[in-house]
Image (tube, rainbow, N blue to C red):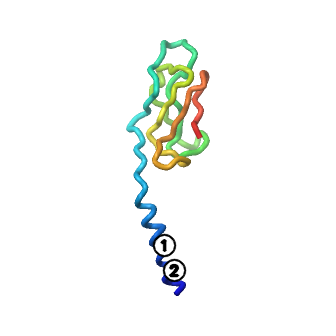
Amino acid sequence: MWRLVLVIAVTAVIAGCDDAPACRAPAHTTYSCDPIPAGGRGCVGGPVWSTVYSTIDAARPQHQDDPALTFPQGCQASIPECSPFYRNEPRAFTCDGTGWSELL
């Protein structure tokens, strides 16, 4: 009897996992705004991120798209990696005027 209950429970969990749509992270960093002239108040370059979600440290390769552009305060960026916190969503950042902060 317990085996049957266990088999049904495991089957339900596996079937439930397959129903979730896959994350559709962008192929490159996308922004909710256009860049502003260099020297303006904003974030220089896109957000800096590592391919494995964690705090940035020297042991992990870092990525930054559009390093020569400046983005205005309030601009949002989506990077080409899925969020570990929100299913089916890319990781997102916002420019606070001096740097990028991840939206959690």
Is residue 39 shown left or right of residue 12? right
The correct choice, above or below, for 88 with respect to 6 in the image is above
Is residue 72 shown left or right of residue 21? right
Tell me the quarter of the image containing the C terminus: top right
* Cα–Cα gap, marks 1 and 2: 9 Å
Between circles 1 and 2, the one closer to the viewer is 2
For residue 73, which numbered disc appears in the image?
A: none
At x 51%, y 21%, the residue is 71
Element at badge 2? helix
Pointer 1: residues within 10 angstroms few (<14), some, or many (20+)?
Answer: few
Q: Which residue is mark 2?
A: 5
At x 40%, y 44%, the residue is 24
The correct choice, above or below, for 40 with respect to 31 in the image is above
At x 56%, y 21%, the residue is 73
Element at badge 1? helix
In which quadrant of the rendered view does residue 40 lie?
top right
Q: Which residue is mark 1?
A: 10
Pointer 2: residues within 10 angstroms few (<14), some, or many (20+)?
Answer: few
At x 50%, y 19%, the residue is 70
Q: In this rendered view, identify the residue nearer to me: 84 or 60.
A: 84
Image location of residue 5, percent across then percent down? 51, 80
- Residue furthest to the bottom in view is 1
Image location of residue 82, percent across then percent down? 47, 45
Image location of residue 21, percent across then percent down? 40, 52
Q: Earlier in the sequence, mark 1 or mark 2?
A: 2
